[in-house]
Image (spheres, helix red, strand yellow):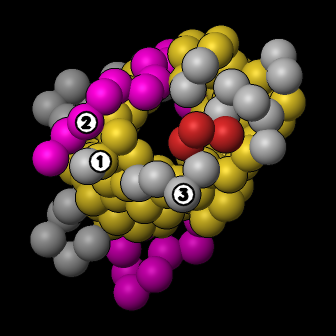
């Protein structure tokens, strides 16, 4: 069950191709953005890998390659998600994020599974919406 909304961020992304796996494309996506997370304003930077699966869907993973900067400290996050390409040339992912931080504004997110919506339009503009999973 979805709990309280804990984050809403906007970001821009850049994409580069990596070596194909099993003849299917692999993309590396870097994102930078800002918004609200936990108890304050943050900026984020992250890099994730998105693999095209045999059925055309996507699997994405950010293996502890996300950084969160708040006014009272810094944190990291990791995430995994299932996704798909959108009709307009973007992509959409749904998954789980895990935050680790000693910053007081982010510490309340430690040890919790946060479900997310990550939507990227064809121009590389992204939204990242997060809820606590109860």
Task: Of the two numbered discs 1 and 3 on the same chain, state the one appearing first in sequence.
Answer: 3
> Is 10 a magenta residue?
yes
Tag 1's secondary structure?
strand
Q: Residue at x 46, y 81 (%)?
A: 21
Mark 3 crowd level (few <14, some 14–19, many ≥20, 10 Å Cα): few
Residue at image mark 3: 111
Residue 43 relative to residue 80: left or right: right
Mark 1 crowd level (few <14, some 14–19, many ≥20, 10 Å Cα): some
How far across and down, in percent of the image, does residue 113 sit? 41, 54
Tag 3's secondary structure?
loop
Q: Residue at x 44, y 19 (%)?
A: 8
Q: Is residue 8 visible?
A: yes
Residue at image mark 1: 133
Task: Of the two numbered discs 1 and 2 on the same chain, state the one appearing first in sequence.
Answer: 2
How far across and down, in percent of the image, does residue 89 sit? 28, 32
Residue at image mark 2: 3
How far across and down, in percent of the image, does residue 55 sit? 14, 71
The quadrant in which residue 88 appears is: top left
Tag 2's secondary structure?
strand
Region rendered in magenta: 1-25
Marks 1 and 3, how far apart in space? 11 Å
- Callout 2 touching callout 3 (CB < 8 Å): no
- Callout 1 touching callout 2 (CB < 8 Å): yes
The quadrant in which residue 12 appears is: top right
Outermost residue to the bottom = 22
> Is 56 a magenta residue?
no
């Amino acid at each position: 069950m979805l709990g309280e909304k804990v984050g809403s961020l906007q970001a821009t992304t850049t994409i580069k191709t990596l070596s194909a796996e099993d003849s299917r494309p692999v993309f590396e996506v870097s994102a930078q953005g800002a918004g609200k997370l936990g108890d304050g304003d943050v900026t984020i930077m992250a890099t994730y890998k998105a693999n095209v699966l045999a059925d055309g869907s996507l699997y994405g993973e950010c293996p502890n390659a996300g950084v969160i900067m708040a006014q009272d400290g810094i944190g990291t996050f990791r995430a995994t998600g299932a996704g798909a390409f959108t009709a307009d040339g973007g992509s959409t992912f749904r998954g789980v994020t895990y935050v680790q931080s000693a910053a007081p504004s982010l510490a309340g997110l430690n040890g919790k599974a946060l479900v997310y919506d990550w939507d990227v339009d064809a121009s590389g503009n992204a939204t990242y919406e997060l809820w606590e999973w109860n």
